Amino acid sequence: MWLICILPGMMNLAWDCVLVLFFVSQRHLFLLNRLKEIEMKSSDVTGACNTPVVYSTDSKHFSGSCISKSLFSEVNICHFLLNICGGPSGGDRGMAMNRKEIQHGSWILIKGTIRFLFMVVNNLVAIPSYVLYLIVLQPLKLFNSKLFWHVEGIMFKWLLAMVSSWGWTAGYTVVEWGDDVKAITEDETMVLVNHQATGDVCTLMMCLQDKGTVVCHMMWLMEYIFKFTNFGVVSLIHGDFFIRQGKAHRDKQLILLRQHLEKYYRSRDRKWIVLFPEGGFLRKRRETSQSFAKKNNLPFLKHVTLPRKGATEVILQTLCAQHENGAVGDANGAEEASSWKEISFSDILLMIGTPSWNITSTIGGLTKNPGILGSCPEYQEDCSFHPNDSVPVSLEKQKGLQWVVDITIAYHKAKPIDIQTWIIGYREPTVTHVHYRIYPIKDVPIESEALTRWLYQRFVEKDELLAHFYETGAFPPPKGQTTATSRAMTLDPLWLFLVQIMGFLSGYMWYNVLQYVYNCLGL
């Protein structure tokens, strides 16, 4: 049965990878031969008008040539495809494939085939093992649901570590910039990420591996089509949400998202929720976004697109701790009392845990502490209140979203990595740069128009960050600082090896168990 569940996704992914492998193996042959034909066809023309033919991907360089515009266009396309493939484009390198290029292409084909086959086997042993483990653990879910989802989270992290290892072994690494998010890994956090390609998800899977238990307790919002991939069954069980794009589905999807969060987010002890507010890949939405911005006098963005607030607004409304008056922490501007003496004990209880207030037993009352998000972050006993010298009331940390992490992903030379590249590894080893910025939830408005402006401002900042990165190769320093520091994100090879061994041993074990059951049933 589990084979039926994952087979369609595996077939789709296999077909995509086969196409990529075929393209890589044939990348130079057709294109270079066609360029040679064009060279021969244009020789008579250039001889007649004494104008040299200059092969270039820049059409401006052909202004003095006698070649027809159609041939110019075809030359441009051939050169463009050759540049993407990393192959020669004529000129001093010649029009024929040399031995070194053939060897390089053959090595890519062999390496890609081996990596692809390993990925297929990896999925066939790891995903069914994950499903079967959770089926066997169903009695635990009845008696101790929290422990069940804790175990599930650990296995989920292992699966994502396997995906991370595919890119890591291909030489695709991550360098991190900006704020250090390790200090807030146990807090409820909403993560906003720019979206350029399918490799964004793989990059996040990798760079969050060393962030404590984040991966174990995270929830993803992803495109609906991913539900039907090889990893879709895992995401369904884990409790991720698959969202349909398009105006026809928008309102219904937001209702379903709210219901999903209310049902699964805290019952499964989720902490971080990851979403892509742009609602699609940069290459697909940029033109539409820029046109919309021009018509509505909005920021004109080049490296990101204008975000959509729908899912972000639903998450804030659903997961932020609300008070009786409907306010969400300090984010909605909950009014401060004009006088301490006018605050009742019930009002004080409502204030407990809000971002701008802290209770201390030292003075037996309230003291303002804007730098602390939530009450009693260290769960100390000195965080208590004594109303009218009565018995101390112990205060717990306020539940609800506490942070928003703004993640900006930048690729080398603005060339995103897709899932096929991640698996097959036909691109040269490259470094992906990830920038973090942390915002307290009290700084995030929840009112619709204010939230829209806030999101736009974040993506304007993203666009500026990416523009600076593509120009200099580094993210700019934080405000008030003169230098920006980066840190290499590393994965322990031994840890990745042990995870893979665990996956294959589990697959072998379940194969023998199912074979034994099959024989016992006499099927």
Image: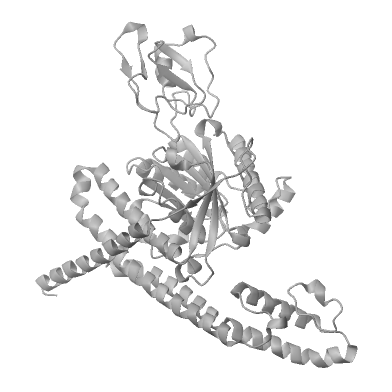
Image point (41%, 41%), residue name: 185
Residue 364 sits above or below residue 422 on the image: above
Q: Quadrant of the N terminus?
A: bottom left
Displayed quadrant of residue 60: bottom right
With 59 as the anchor, is 227 left or right in this view? left
Q: Is residue 129 visible?
A: yes
Identify whether 43 is placed above or below 324: below
Q: Position of residue 223 (x, y in %)?
A: 48, 57
Based on the displayed image, in which of its 4 quarters is residue 28 positioned? bottom right
Q: Position of residue 241 (x, y in %)?
A: 42, 51
Q: Is residue 519 above or below residue 215?
A: below
344 vs 272, nearest the viewer: 272
Residue ID at (69%, 53%): 290
Q: Residue at x 19, y 43 (%)?
A: 143
- Residue located 84% across and 84% down the image: 52
Q: In screen coordinates, is 231 left or right of 282?
A: left
Q: Is residue 385 above or below residue 79?
A: above
* Quarter of the picture holding the C terminus: bottom left
The furthest residue to the right: 49
Q: How is the image coloured?
A: one colour
Is there any visible trace of residue 243 in the rendered image? no
Q: How many marks?
A: 0
Relative placement, left or right, of 287 versus 310 is: right
User: Where is residue 417 shown, x and y percent of the image?
Assistant: 54, 63
Q: Give coordinates of residue 461: x percent, y percent.
A: 64, 44
